[in-house]
Image (tube, rainbow, N blue to C red):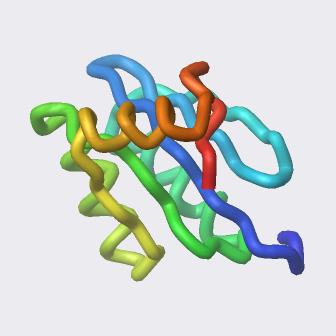
C-alpha cells in the first residue's frame, strides 16, 4: 500500500484488537475472532511492514499470532512488563501510541 516502512502495534483483549499503524497514524479496531483476524491479516499484507508487535495476554493473542505467522508477516510477541518499562523509559504511557 505505502512504499515507506510501516510498524504495527496491537493491544489485545478478549473481545477486541486495537491496531495502530505507524507512521501513518492509522488506528483500526476489530473483534478478536478468527474471521475478523483473517480479514485484518489480508489487509496488513498490503503494507510494507517492518515489524508487528503485540504483548502476551495469557493466550488471547494465540489466533492472531497463528494467522500472522502463517503468512510470514514479521511479528514479535513481547512481555507486558517489558513493553510497559520501555514506554516509561521513552516518556510515553498512552495506549495506542506505540513507540518504534
Q: Write down the quadrant of residue 34 in the picture.
A: top left
Q: Write down the quadrant of residue 65 in the picture.
A: bottom left
Asked if residue 74 is positioned above or below residue 64 in the image, the reply reads below
Asked if residue 81 is positioned above or below residue 14 in the image, the reply reads below
Point out residue 5 in the picture as x, y percentages from the top left corner: 76, 74
Would residue 7 appear left or right of 36 to someone viewing this image? right
Would residue 50 appear left or right of 77 to someone viewing this image? right
Residue depicted at x 64% and y 72%: 49
- What is the quadrant of the C terminus in the image? bottom right
Would residue 42 appear left or right of 62 to someone viewing this image? right
Please state which of residues 35 and 17 is positioned toward the viewer in this rendering: 17
Q: Write down the quadrant of residue 94 in the picture.
A: top right
Point out residue 99 in the picture as x, y percentages from the top left corner: 62, 46
Would residue 87 appear left or right of 23 to someone viewing this image? left
Please state which of residues 48 and 30 is positioned toward the viewer in this rendering: 48
Residue depicted at x 37% and y 41%: 83
Point out residue 53 in the picture as x, y percentages from the top left corner: 44, 54
- What is the quadrant of the N terminus in the image? bottom right
Point out residue 17 in the picture as x, y percentages from the top left corner: 46, 31
Residue depicted at x 26% and y 36%: 80
Amino acid at each position: 500500500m505505502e512504499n515507506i516502512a510501516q510498524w504495527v502495534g496491537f493491544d489485545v483483549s478478549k473481545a477486541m484488537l486495537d491496531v495502530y499503524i505507524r507512521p501513518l497514524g492509522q488506528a483500526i479496531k476489530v473483534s478478536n475472532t478468527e474471521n475478523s483476524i483473517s480479514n485484518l491479516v489480508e489487509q496488513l499484507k498490503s503494507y510494507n511492514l517492518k515489524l508487528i508487535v503485540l504483548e502476551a495476554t495469557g493466550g488471547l493473542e494465540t489466533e492472531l499470532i497463528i494467522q500472522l505467522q502463517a503468512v510470514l508477516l514479521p511479528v514479535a510477541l513481547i512481555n507486558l512488563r517489558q513493553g510497559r518499562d520501555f514506554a516509561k523509559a521513552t516518556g510515553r504511557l498512552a495506549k495506542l501510541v506505540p513507540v518504534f
